[in-house]
Image: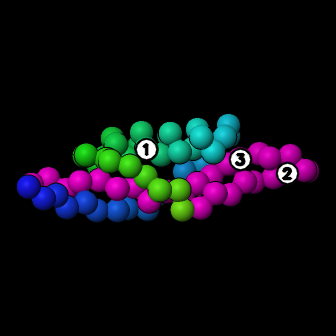
Amino acid sequence: MSSVARVTTITVRSDTSFEDAVAAGVARASQTLRHVSGAWIKEQKVEASEGKITGWSVTLEVTFVLDD
């Protein structure tokens, strides 16, 4: 049996950390997409104000398996 997967790109921002942004992105993608099997972190960025980090964002490539 073979399977076919698709990849979609999402961007997620967190006030806490990169890890939180990734977890939130995968959780949110799983609400809309069935069979999410993984994610690749394509890009990471931080926002800063007056020398302090104020936000973390990631661009994720989320992989999901298509229904038969």
- Judged from the image, the secondary structure of the residue bearing numbered disc 3 is strand
Image mark count: 3
> What residue is pinned by disc 2?
49
Q: Amino acid at mark 1?
A: Val
- Relative side of 20 to 31, left or right: right
Q: Is residue 25 magenta?
A: no
Cα separation, mark 3 vs mark 2, equals 9 Å
Image spot of residue 50 (x, y percent):
91, 50
> 58 or 40: nearer the eye?
40
Q: Residue at x 14, y 53 (%)?
A: 67
Q: Amino acid at mark 2?
A: Ser
Direction right: furthest residue: 50
Task: Answer yes or no: is residue 42 visible.
Answer: yes
> 47 or 60: nearer the eye?
60
> What residue is pinned by disc 3?
55
- The tag earlier along the polypeptide, 2 or 1, is 1
Q: Is residue 8 above or below residue 19?
A: below
> What residue is pinned by disc 1?
26
- The tag earlier along the polypeptide, 1 or 3, is 1
Image quarter hosting the C terminus: bottom left
Q: Which residues make up the magenta segment?
A: 43-68
Q: Residue at x 31, y 47 (%)?
A: 36
- Relative side of 14 to 46, left or right: left
Query: Which is the main secondary structure of the residues drawn in magenta?
Result: strand
